[in-house]
Image (cartoon, grey):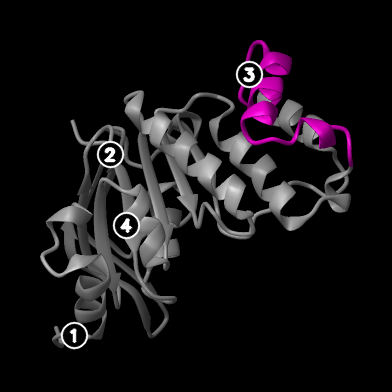
Amino acid sequence: MAAIEVAGLRKEYGDVVALDGLDLTVESGELYGLLGPNGSGKTTTIEILTGQRTPTEGTVSVLGTDPVADPIDVRRSIGILPEREDPPSFLTPREYLEFVGDVRSLSNVDDRIEMWADTFDFRGILDTLNSDLSEGERQRVMLAQVFIHEPDLAFIDEPLVNLDPLMQAEVKRELRRYCEDGNTLFLSTHFVEVAEQLCTEVGIIADGRLRTQRAPETMDDGLLSTYESEVTEEVPTP
């Protein structure tokens, strides 16, 4: 069974069409990247897949469940990191992750917090107010909340934003390991190099439509050239 299946997905905001008949499939175990320019529909796609927004038309299946009909059920099984999402400023990383653990009814929360603090290198700031952390430190805390409950599927919008080069390399290793363990990762980005370095499968989206979906190494002219040709190609009028 595919981890994600989308057919004929359309989303309208008044006269604006954010998604225009999107079709895509993500197999279990894939590190899938949705690559596209700003305003192409990436964030709207993630919001629909995670039950945060209702499509105008189309069908969606996430881990065999419809996130439109059963958003709470879907959210129990996945991890989510929206772009530019910060932990609550009035809590410390430890307090925030304890809260996440309580919401998700996790056992051994303290051990999980210590493990992810080590993985993303923020043990030294566990008891510092989030308001006093740098943007990169807050991003590391948010990455920890994605994985603390060991989800089968995770959605991350721009995973490497605000991270220094060493932490970017560590996060890339962790994301690959996560999928090598049989889990599925769906990330969105407008950085070609992120998709090329990380992803086993890349979908290129422009004007709310999926232009192509392939493994980066199978793109004859390379991912950058394929991306340039696909996003500048005129979309036919329906």
For mark 3, give the secondary structure: loop
Q: Which mark is residue 199?
A: none
Which residue position is annotated with label 1? 233
Give the alpha-carbon distance from disc 4 to disc 1, as whole Å: 21 Å
Task: Specify which label sits upstream in the sequence, 2 or 3.
Answer: 2
**Circle 3 sits on which residue?**
105
Which mark's residue is nearer the viewer, 4 or 3?
A: 4
Instruction: Name the image quarter holding residue 124.
Output: top right
Q: Which residues are magenta?
A: 102-128
Mark 3–mark 1 distance (CA, rounded to whole Å): 48 Å
- The amino acid at mark 2 is Glu
Q: Nearer the viewer, residue 216 or 151?
A: 216
Looking at the rendered structure, the kind of residue marked 3 is Ser
Earlier residue among tags 1 and 2: 2
Residue identified by numbered label 2: 30
Give the CA separation, mark 2 to mark 4. Answer: 14 Å
Instruction: Classify residue 133 as left or right of residue 47.
Output: right
Q: Earlier in the sequence, mark 4 or mark 1?
A: 4
Q: How far across and down, in percent of the image, does residue 100 sit?
A: 68, 31
Helix, strand or loop under label 1: loop
